[in-house]
């Protein structure tokens, strides 16, 4: 499923916030991401239309089963790419996070996997 960097960041933020409280307010997502609420509302509407999120009008949001599975998959991939950028290119953690998210959103799904395999950052098959 194709998501923009902002949509990915929102999905990952909701995942993180969900681990603290099952119901997540858009203002909490905006605060965590350091963006304004209209930016979050737009991303949440798109995520809802993609079936990744359920949200009540002026209410809290929560991930659907599909949204939770995708968010957890994205989180694992992001963590591996962050390690790749930190270890291979000696980037600071904050820049590695940005690079990982942009890479994940800007390339085909196969490209980050190839990078992970090339660098040895991909999970080993058993």
Image (cartoon, grey):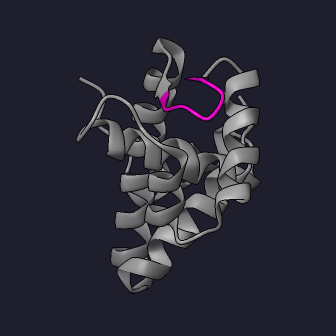
Q: Residue furthest front?
A: 58
Residue appearing at x 46%, y 13% in the figure: 65
63 in relation to 14, above or below: above
Q: How many marks?
A: 0
Residue 57 drawn in magenta: yes
Q: Residue furthest top?
A: 65
Residue appearing at x 47%, y 65% in the figure: 31
Locate residue 95, reporting x and y percent.
49, 81
Frontmost residue, 20 versus 68: 20
52 in relation to 73, above or below: above
Query: In which quadrant of the rendered view does residue 28 lie?
Result: bottom left
**Residue 6 in the figure: left or right of residue 90:** right
Locate residue 21, reporting x and y percent.
27, 36
Residue 83 drawn in magenta: no
8 in relation to 96, above or below: above
Frontmost residue, 115 versus 15: 15
Locate residue 58, reporting x and y percent.
61, 35
Q: Quadrant of the N terminus?
A: top right
Residue range corresponding to the magenta coloring: 53-61
Frontmost residue, 35 versus 99: 35
Frontmost residue, 41 versus 4: 41
Query: In which quadrant of the rendered view does residue 113 lie?
Result: top right
120 in relation to 31, above or below: above
Q: Quadrant of the C terminus?
A: top left
Locate residue 36, reporting x and y percent.
65, 67
Query: In which quadrant of the rendered view does residue 14 lie?
Result: top left
Residue appearing at x 45%, y 59% in the figure: 81
Residue appearing at x 76%, y 46% in the figure: 42
């Amino acid at each position: 499923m194709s998501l923009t960097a902002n949509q990915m960041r929102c999905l990952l933020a909701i995942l993180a916030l969900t681990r603290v409280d099952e119901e997540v307010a858009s203002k909490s997502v905006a605060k965590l991401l350091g963006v304004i609420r209209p930016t979050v509302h737009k991303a949440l509407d798109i995520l809802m239309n993609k079936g990744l999120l359920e949200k009540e009008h002026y209410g809290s949001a929560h991930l659907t089963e599909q949204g939770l599975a995708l968010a957890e998959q994205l989180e694992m991939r992001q963590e591996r790419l962050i390690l790749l950028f930190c270890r291979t290119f000696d980037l600071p953690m904050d820049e590695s996070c940005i690079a990982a998210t942009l890479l994940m959103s800007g390339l085909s799904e196969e490209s980050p996997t190839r990078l992970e395999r090339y660098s040895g950052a991909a999970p080993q098959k058993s």
